[in-house]
Image (cartoon, helix red, strand yellow):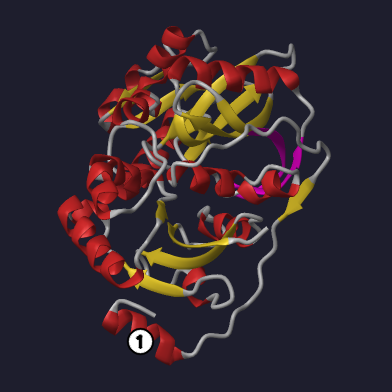
């Protein structure tokens, strides 16, 4: 079958100990049976490793942080599109999704396809709203509440018992065993991501995850459950294994059906020792371990691109359980001239 040539822009090139999904998404697209893909990398920092992986990324453009203003980000994307003629754009960071969703229709007017959740879907699954989300869709969630100042820490008991989780609104989560640790983590997270900080009941059990892709009509295009086997000090999976767990899949199908979720997502769950599942977080995009799903037989990034291009996609019906991923790191040697070129010209 002849492959269709397309150009896909991808963010999340920070393939470090806190990896973004960009590089595994690109690897999946490179293995597509349907597309011959030219990859345009979108970088926020000039030290994101993916910038310098020339066999992975064809061209890189530096883009402004969404916090500087959505208009500036959109202007930059319009400039890049005028040169590269982007067919599909895949943003991979939680913190940038609000901007991309807000001007999604303008991207479509330019001819750039996306497959993103609606603003309502994006907003209602925020960590600060998880208790309401659980009640609305009939899902077990831990008790949680947001706090905005250190002064509120003393009022956490008896509402919460220790240990408890201290979580940022976008990223980062720490287990705290006393008020002093809560205060420490509050300051650490707030400095990086701002407030509110979410205090969440600590559920004892095994952390498991599901990657999924929804078609926006209530159907699940793909879903693969896994268990983390090695977790870094930042809470990131450095190794994992696919699971044969129908209960996890049923929960995933239930959420996608009731919410009519459009786009990629990751469900973070705790499986308790009495086999109950608690939803502790919903990441509204493809997770960094997506390549495990590809290795298990579901090329979710390829399916997402097809949806973004308006093509019909048959749902995946099987995957291989017992497939493992193990991350590793290696040193790239980069010429200083490339770093200077990106820093000076904003593209490489």
Residue 154 appears in view: yes
Q: Nearer the viewer, residue 276 or 61?
A: 61
Residue 204, relative to residue 185: is it above or below?
above
Residue count near mark 1 (Cα–Cα under 10 Å), binned few <14, some 14–19, many ≥20: few
Residue nearest the observer in this picture, 341 or 214: 214
Dominant secondary-structure state across the stretch colored magenta: strand
Quarter of the rendering containing residue 110: bottom left
Residue 343 in the figure: left or right of residue 333: left
Q: Residue furthest front?
A: 1
Residue 65 part of the magenta segment: no
Which residue is more in the foreground, 160 or 65? 65
Q: Which residue is mark 1?
A: 340
Task: Return the x and y of residue 280 as percentages of the image width and height.
Answer: 52, 25
Looking at the image, residue 4 lies above or below residue 209: below
**How far from the left and from the top, in percent, is residue 53?**
55, 75
Q: Which residues are magenta?
A: 223-242
Observer able to see residue 172: no
Let me know if residue 227 is in the magenta part.
yes
């Amino acid at each position: 079958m002849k492959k269709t040539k397309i150009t896909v822009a991808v963010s999340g090139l920070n393939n470090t100990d806190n990896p973004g999904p960009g590089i595994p998404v690109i690897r999946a697209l490179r293995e597509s049976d349907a597309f011959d893909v030219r990859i345009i990398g979108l970088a926020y920092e000039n030290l994101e490793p993916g910038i310098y992986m020339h066999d992975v990324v064809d061209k890189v453009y530096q883009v402004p942080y969404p916090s500087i203003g959505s208009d500036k980000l959109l202007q930059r994307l319009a400039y890049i599109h005028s040169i590269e003629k982007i067919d599909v754009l895949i943003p991979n960071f939680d913190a940038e999704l609000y901007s991309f969703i807000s001007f999604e229709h303008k991207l479509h007017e330019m001819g750039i396809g996306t497959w993103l959740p609606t603003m309502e879907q994006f907003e209602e699954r925020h960590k600060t709203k998880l208790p309401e989300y659980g009640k609305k869709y009939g899902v077990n969630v831990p008790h949680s509440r947001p706090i905005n100042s250190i002064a509120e820490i003393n009022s956490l008991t008896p509402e919460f018992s220790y240990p408890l989780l201290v979580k940022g609104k976008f990223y980062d989560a720490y287990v705290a065993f006393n008020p002093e640790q809560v205060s420490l983590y509050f300051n650490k997270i707030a400095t990086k991501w701002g407030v509110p900080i979410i205090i969440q009941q600590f559920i004892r059990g095994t952390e498991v995850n599901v990657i999924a892709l929804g078609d926006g009509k209530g159907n699940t295009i793909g879903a693969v459950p896994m268990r983390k086997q090695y977790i870094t000090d930042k809470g990131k999976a450095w190794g994992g294994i696919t699971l044969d767990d129908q209960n996890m899949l049923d929960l995933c199908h239930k959420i996608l059906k009731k919410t009519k979720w459009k786009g990629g997502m990751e469900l973070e769950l705790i499986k308790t020792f009495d086999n109950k599942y608690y939803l502790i977080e919903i990441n509204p995009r493809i997770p960094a371990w997506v390549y495990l799903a590809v290795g298990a037989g579901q090329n979710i990034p390829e399916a997402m691109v097809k949806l973004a291009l308006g093509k019909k996609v048959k749902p995946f019906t099987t995957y291989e359980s017992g497939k493992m991923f193990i991350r590793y790191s290696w040193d790239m040697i980069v010429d200083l001239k490339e770093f200077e070129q990106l820093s000076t010209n904003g593209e490489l």
